[in-house]
Amino acid sequence: MLSETMSIMWFFRFLAIGLLSGTVMIPLLHSPRGEGFEHLRLDAIVNLEIGWFLMVPISLVVGVFWVGFFSKRTRPAPPGFVLGGITVAFGALVLSQAMATSRWLNSWPSGVGDPDGEYVMAAFAELSGVVTLLVGATILISRGIAVRHSRKTVAPAP
């Protein structure tokens, strides 16, 4: 049971790292099609999703090799509060920006010529933001449980 729990924590650690490292692709890909902040936000969301498509599998494969070959610890520590907090904040940012992009794409007149494809990308970003929030919350909860178990104190007898 303990090793299974630690395997799950390794998975969440490398999943969070993969989600966060997807931001590297935002400035590296193509420029926005239109003028203004909304077009820039839509392009950033699309580039982030491409970054996730590339970086999350790479991060999970690196995690498998790291745990299998390079990890010397038999019982690794669960991911920390910092990683969980950053992941929650990042998920909230992605979710809020994706929701704002969806509202912009559904407004009349639409910000882009044919908003159907862009709306699907914004909806996928909303879903990804929720998943990122859940991953961060899971990391925070598991770390809190680990800290609580490590600090068990026995109350003095009355």
Image (spheres, rainbow, N blue to C red):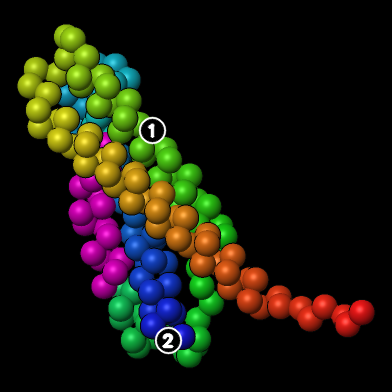
> What residue is disc 1 on?
96
Give the residue drawn at x 34%, y 44%: 129
Q: Position of residue 115 (x, y in %)?
A: 12, 24
Q: Is residue 53 above or below residue 104?
A: below
Q: Position of residue 43 (x, y in %)?
A: 23, 32
Which residues make up the magenta segment? 45-61
Please state, as top left, top right, bottom left or bottom right, where the N terminus lies in the image: bottom left
Measured in 3D between alpha carbons, the distance from the residue under mark 2 to the one under mark 1, in whole angstroms, is 37 Å
Decide if residue 87 is on the left or right side of residue 132. Answer: right
Comes first in the chain, label 2 or label 1: 2
What kind of residue is marked 1?
Answer: Ser
Give the residue drawn at x 58%, y 73%: 146
Q: Is residue 50 above or below residue 72?
A: above
Decide if residue 128 is on the left or right side of residue 88. Answer: left
Residue 127 or 75: which is nearer the viewer? 127
Give the residue drawn at x 45%, y 60%: 138
Residue 148 or 28: which is nearer the viewer? 148
Return the mark for residue 143.
none
> What residue is disc 2 on?
1
Q: Is residue 25 visible?
A: no
